[in-house]
Structure formats: C-alpha cells, structure tokens
Amino acid sequence: MYVRDAKNREEVWLLDHIEEMGLDETAFRSRDYVVAIDEASGEKAGFGRIRIHKTDEGEFCELTSIGVLDSWRRQGVGAHVVERLVEHARDQSFETVYSLTSATDYLAQFGFEGADAADLPERLVERLETKRENLDPDAVGMRLAVAEFEMPDRLRERFKGAQPTDDDGEPEESAEDFGIDPDSATYKYDTGG
C-alpha cells in the first residue's frame, strides 16, 4: 500500500467517489489530489486533496475531500492520505494547514486542534459557511502546525497490512429471506437430480 499523486486519467474515478461520499468537489483539479493504492492489486483505496487559497491576506492551505472506500476503512488508509497531504503542504513552505470538517476526533489524533472562526483566515470562514450550508452542517475549523504532525503507530501498522474487506455492509440474501424453505421447495426448472 502506498500513496501517490493522482493522475489526470483518474479524474472520473475521483469525481465519482467524491460525489458518492458527499465530499466537496468545489474547484476540482485532479492534480491537487493524492490517491492511496494497493501495490499488489493496483486497486485504489482512498484519496484526499490539498487546496491552496491565494488571498490578499496571503496563501492558506486546506486539506479537503478526504475519503476512503468502504472496503478499505479502519486500516490506516485515510491516515496516510492525510500524512501525504501534510507533506505536500510542508514542501510548499506552509507552516500551518487547515481543514473544515465534522470529523474532529479523527484529525485530532494527528495533532489538529479546533480553530474558532475568528482565528481562521477570512477566505476559510467563507468556505466554512458554504460547507455547512451544502455538505457538512456540523463542520468546524481545524488547524495543524505542519511540524507538529504525528502519525499514531497503530495506524502505520494497520496500513502496512491493509487488505480490502469483502463485507459491503449488507448480508447475503438467502431463500429464507423470501419466505422459502430451501429443504422442501421445488423449483420450476428442478430436474430432480
């Protein structure tokens, strides 16, 4: 399992999953994304975006649209997507990154802290209001000093052995689910053999 920059050809895949997960696709550019890939199968497991806001106040870096496919959840995939996004921010000389989300407990494990709207750059206050109206009514501002990022050991270990689960959350349907007794039922095309 590894995380790399998204490729242009993955645009449709990204947009499909962003829509399916109800994530933010505002000002979509595939080159802003990273994708988690299973190196054995080539299967995509998760993704996330770094978004740079250029304003009169300066430039601000937001981590957004972070998603993990259901079959890859709880295996450290999202954590490594976040780590890669923070590395990109550091490489672009950002000392602080922001995120606007209701997943505060998740981000807190990496060192993110809550930020009051008064402590957010004006552009991010506007984004927060829009996000609350359209996608995530419980979203709040979070920020992280890039140098303070921490990857919990348990998530690093989970990521090393990540495997997709076959459980799609729905039990397999059986004859009994439809009121059929499989021991005594006969079927139209039963050959009796």
Image (cartoon, grey):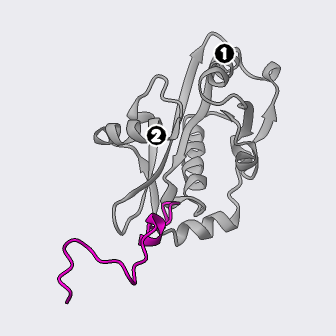
Pinpoint residue 8: horizontal percent, then vertical percent: 31, 38
Q: Residue furthest top?
A: 56
Give the quadrant of residue 59: top right
> In the picture shown, does residue 26 fall above or below 142?
above
Please, what is the three-letter code of the amino acid marked with disc 1?
Answer: Glu
Disc 1 crowd rating (10 Å Cα; few below 14, some 14-19, many 20+) is: few
Q: Earlier in the sequence, mark 1 or mark 2?
A: 2
Residue tagged 2: 20
Pinpoint residue 132: horizontal percent, then vertical percent: 67, 24
Residue at horizontal 79%, vertical 21%? 117
Q: Main secondary structure of the magenta part?
A: loop
Question: Could you tell me how far apart the alpha carbons at marks 1 and 2 are, in whole angstroms?
Answer: 24 Å
Pinpoint residue 53: horizontal percent, then vertical percent: 57, 21
Q: Which mark is residue 126?
A: 1
Front position in the image: 130 or 60:
130
Q: Is residue 164 visible?
A: no
Please, what is the three-letter code of the amino acid marked with disc 2?
Answer: Glu
Left or right of residue 49, residue 105 in this image: right
Give the quadrant of residue 79: bottom right
Q: Which mark is residue 112?
A: none
Q: Which residues are magenta?
A: 164-193
Per the image, is 90 magenta?
A: no
- Secondary element at tag 1: helix
